[in-house]
Image: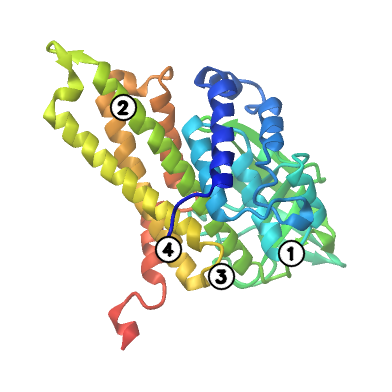
Amino acid sequence: MDFTFNQEQQQFADALRRWADKDYRFEARQAIMHSDSGVSDAAWATLTELGMTALPLPGEQGGFDGTAVDMLLVMQELGRALVIEPYFATVFGAQFLKLSGSHGDVLRQVADGGVKLACALGEAQSRHDLHDIATTATRSGDGFVLDGTKTVVIHGAQAAYLIVSARSSGEQRGTDGISLFLVPFDAPGVTVRDYRTIDGQRAATVTLVQVVLGSDALIGDAGNGWDVLDAATDYGVTLLCAEAVGAMDAIFAATLEYLKTRQQFGAPIGKFQALQHRMADMFIHLEQARSMAMLAAAKVDTAEPVERRRIVSAAKARVGQAATFVGQQAVQLHGGMGVTDELPAAHHFKRLTMIGLSLGDAGHHIERFIAQPGFLPSEHA
């Protein structure tokens, strides 16, 4: 498989890196993080101007028909620069609308940067099982009434619309009976409590009390939302894997530079063989994670569901393991300053930790990988 990026893809990545190096340096990022909103309208406008909001969207909605491989480069640069704007939340949410073929008008507004999205999928009891849904969608005339609470909704308070999963029938942990809805942020009965997470992102607890929606709020068919939820989540996982690789690139480079300049016993500590071995181990983990992230990006758009689940879960598990190892080693090699707020590496480590827990940790995805048909020898008999 050829993983050589074409000129247009590289130009996108280069443009994003130039912007980050010039206008989204660590100090600027810290100021944005500590602001009341936690995001920057100017940064969002630049991402839109660069075409990043339009990149993954269909051409008929004003997008560029970008693939997951195109997005791989974008997410790597965002991870490298520790960008905390609601880009991932928006393109993740847009994937639900793309897969269902619905709400083209909203996708057009996403493409031109006028609308941000967020995905309200997790609940207090669900952990990584997104089919464990206690939020209810009760039929009311031609529409529905939603009740429930969604937790850790990334950039929920910064979104104009929420993608909400709810149960319209079936058992709480079943995959049948799941419906997906596009819910306006300001719909009566929607309450959003915004807070900052340990990695500088924004998240929210979203409470839905007697939220009345018309049938036009449905994403896809009522009760048949699992396939879209499953496929869109795999796309989101793929984006997170790419972002993690970018963050690992940055923290590895920073650690290497530190070992070259930090003096101990009259010599740079990078000359000590034990530390060279640790850097070599970090590099191996990073390159294995990069390979798996590339494989997931190459397959997530086109593979059959079983193959897609297997590849994406393998990638998330391996990237999660690598992120933990690379992040912990980088912090240790920096010494006490590795956990200080003033050091970018500390923030990369926090982001890697959060990515590892988002949309399923390594353990969850190993179990999912094993559960796919054809893994156990007995299934081949």
* Residue 82 x, y percent position in the rendering: 50, 31
Query: Where's the C terminus, which quadrant?
Result: bottom left
Depth check, mark 4 against mark 3: the one in front is 4
Coloration of the structure image: rainbow
Separation of marks 4 and 1 at Cα, in angstroms: 25 Å
Q: Is the C-beta separation of discs 3 and 1 under 8 Å?
A: no
Identify the residue shown where x is 72% and y is 51%: 63
Depth check, mark 3 against mark 1: the one in front is 1
Q: Is the C-beta separation of discs 2 and 3 under 8 Å?
A: no
Label 2 SS: helix
Is 307 in front, or is 187?
307
Residue type indicated by callout 2: Thr
Label 4 SS: helix
Query: Where's the N terminus, which quadrant?
Result: bottom left
Separation of marks 2 and 1 at Cα, in angstroms: 45 Å
Label 3 SS: loop
Q: Is residue 349 left or right of residue 98?
A: left
Disc with the residue nearer the chain's start (4 vs 1): 1
Label 2 Cα neighbours within 10 Å, binned few <14 / some 14-19 / many ≥20: many
Separation of marks 3 and 1 at Cα, in angstroms: 24 Å
Disc with the residue nearer the chain's start (4 vs 3): 3
Is 344 in front, or is 218?
344
Label 3 Cα neighbours within 10 Å, binned few <14 / some 14-19 / many ≥20: some
Res 125 label? none
Which residue in the protein does label 2 denote? 255
Which residue in the protein does label 3 denote? 174
Which residue in the protein does label 1 denote? 101
Disc with the residue nearer the chain's start (3 vs 1): 1
Residue type indicated by callout 1: Gly
Which residue in the protein does label 4 denote? 311
Identify the residue shown where x is 44% and y is 28%: 347
